[in-house]
Image: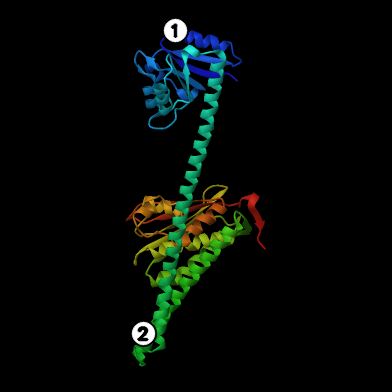
Amino acid sequence: MTLKLLIVDDNPADRAIVRRMLGSTDLDADLHEVALLAELLKMPLEEFDCALIDVRLPDGDGIDTLGDICKGASYPPCPVIVMSGLGDEHTAARAFKAGANDYLIKDSLTPNTLRRTLVNAIDKWHAEDAMRNDWESQQDALRNAERANRAKTQFISTLSHQLRVPLTAIMGFAEMIEIAELGDDETAWKKYRDYAGDIRRSARDVLELAASVIELTRTEADGDTVFATNFDPRKTLRDVVDAFSEEAGEAQIGLEIDDQKAPHSIFTDDRAVQAIMTNLLSNAIKYTPAGHHVLVRLCDVDDENCMFSVADEGAGQNRKDAHGVVHPLDPPASDFASGDDYPLGVGLPLVTSLVRVLGGELSVDKGPGVGTIASVVLPKQAPSHDTQPDS
């Protein structure tokens, strides 16, 4: 292996000595020579195996320049050996502090000394570089783990809140009916019937939330396994929309379906597709004001993919929220610095997980104030290497 070396020295005789000594060793070296620090600063040091820099040069101090090259880091972009005509501890200490890997005294230079110093400097730099990279990787992993832990904690907090709200309503209305708080006349019982409807709707919310948690747990347990079967996604879509028709009617929200260009059959996990449709539609209805519409579309993208999308007329997603949809357990650090509630419950993290398993892609379009379009592009054929027949 040929070593690509750089020597920075204004004395041609000293450079010739170094070149001659390299020729007397068993090192295969390609020596590049420059005379000024200004030339050194133009060189791509990361392309060299080692640089030998003289201390005293016509246009400055070699050690000070080495410090500038390091740019505040404790190491240069390649191994560096500082050379000096005079050997003193102060100069050596300055060189090592600036980031040099070794120090040579010109007057005591021999081929063996030069060879040994070069090999030691190169080995030392690479060993330290490996340690630095390992340390940085560990720190990155630690930061990622801390972010994920905070995200999971916030996720659980949001889930707890989503459970408490309907459960509190169920308990409150049930207690009012139990103790006949409004009396026992016809007017009171009419109110109690309304409360019973509220209890039923709240119980349905809890049931849907529990189903999402179970599905999310199943997805995590199964990993990338897809339980595929042939089915008509148009029927799945119609079933999902029908299940929400009563809720949408009570909320005075219109549901529109566009499946004229939808595929008649796909081979993938029908339960996962139904869960994706259910959670996206539920989210759209939740954030669409009364008197507005939600458009559900299913269509072909090409021969290999189809697309399911839900367009609502709610407040819309900003860029930070969109990141949370696509990367629910990897939010930007600012999400937690602001103190705001984490914007997601179980539904969207479940969608994200299922879309990934099915080999698809989830995207969120439009901005705040103009509604949101959540689109899922899915392969019509499930990933073959992870597919198991649905039993």
Q: Where is residue 154 in the image (x, y as percent from the top left)?
A: 43, 60
- Image vertical order of residue 2 relative to residue 230, above or below: above
- Dot 1 surroundings within 10 Å: few (below 14), some, or many (20 or more)? few
Return the residue at label 1: 12
Nearest the camera: 376 or 140?
Answer: 140
Q: Residue 191 carries which label?
A: 2
Nearest the camera: 172 or 190?
Answer: 172
Nearest the camera: 205 or 104?
Answer: 104
- Image vertical order of residue 111 relative to residue 66, above or below: above
Q: Earlier in the sequence, mark 2 or mark 1?
A: 1
Extreme residue toward the left, this view: 369
Q: Position of residue 196 (x, y in %)?
A: 42, 82
Which structural element holds mark 1?
helix
Give the residue type at disc 2.
Lys
Which structural element holds mark 2?
helix
Q: Residue 236 lies in what quarter of the image?
A: bottom right
Extreme residue toward the front, this view: 89
Report whether residue 242 is seen.
Answer: no
Which residue is found at the position 48% from the left and 66% from the top?
241
Nearest the camera: 169 or 144?
Answer: 144
Which residue is found at the position 41% from the left and 61% from the top?
294
Report whether residue 83 is seen.
Answer: yes
Give the residue type at disc 1.
Pro
Q: How far apart are marks 2 and 1 (CA)?
A: 102 Å
Q: Residue 261 carries which label?
A: none
- Dot 2 surroundings within 10 Å: few (below 14), some, or many (20 or more)? few
Q: Position of residue 3 (x, y in %)?
A: 55, 19
